[in-house]
Amino acid sequence: MEAKVKYLLHLADNPLILGQRLAEWCGHGPVLEQDIALTNTSLDLIGQARLLFQYIASLPGQDTNEDKLAMTRYENQYLNLLLTEQPNHNFGHTIARQFLYDAFNIIQYQALSEHPDEKLNGIAVKTLKEIKYHYRYSSEWVIRLGDGTEKSHQFMQEAFDELWRYTGELFTMAAYENELKEEGYALDVALLEPEWKNRVSSIATKAGLTIPADEVMMFGGKEGKHTEHMGYILTELQYMQRAYPEMNW
């Protein structure tokens, strides 16, 4: 059961932390329309996380609930990808991070929508429509910014150069994934890499962006080892629940 819980936490923590990052744009977007779009995407992601946390809390032996899972764990108990916790910097950087994640997530959830676990299957089917929209939105903006002004192109290329080091973790199996792969429960994420590369390369070409080569990859988030940015995210995310334990709206 422990491996299954960790796997589901990994799936939930990715949208939770990325949603929290996008929420930082609320009221600060470059134009009103994109401010609203980023905020709506944040709400979608946190909604996806909620469904998974609710599922975990319903499993036998889990004395918890979605609020505790989302907002009272310690840093090393979060199993999100390092990519999702990276700072926003600027709109182009946010879009690049979102695109690299979306290009992976759409493939992942297409596979999960055929999962033998009916509950996980149902969550995947329900959220896949949102994920397809997220991918369309971020990929269109990568092209628009990459093939836009000299400044917007510079921001996008700098973002790709900085964020690429975190993409190797997308396709590296954590210990709990390897354990569950033998049971046919966890996806073999390494098999998703060719399609992800095709999607990313196609969009990058249209945007006039160069994909970094021979980058040293960073790992650890899936095992609870995070970058220095994670503590700051949790300080804000967890403040109310830490200050007022068991608070209900």
Image: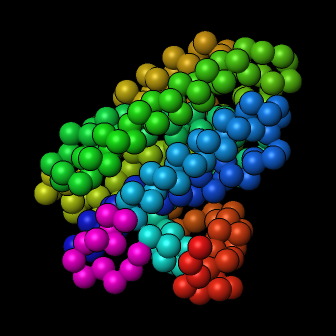
Asked if the magenta segment contains residue 59, the reply would be yes
Front residue of this view, candidates 142 and 22? 22
Position of residue 158 in the picture relative to residue 76 (left or right): right
Q: Is residue 154 above or below residue 73?
A: above
Image x and y of residue 195, in percent: 37, 27
Image x and y of residue 109, in percent: 35, 40
Residue 189 in which image quadrant: top left
Position of residue 18 in the picture relative to residue 60 (left or right): right
Residue 72 in which image quadrant: bottom right
Q: In this view, does 65 lie above or below 32?
A: below
Number of marks:
0
Asked if the magenta segment contains residue 207, the reply would be no
Assign the N terminus to one quadrant of the image.
Answer: bottom left
Q: Give the range drawn in magenta.
A: 54-65
Q: Is residue 187 above or below residue 210?
A: below
- Residue visible at 63% across and 74% down? 238
Residue 127 in which image quadrant: top left
- Residue visible at 57% across and 58% down? 17
Q: How is the image coloured?
A: rainbow
Residue 129 visible in the picture: yes
Residue 218 visible in the picture: no
- Residue visible at 75% across and 48% down? 26
Image x and y of residue 116, in percent: 15, 48
- Furthest toward the right, the residue is 151
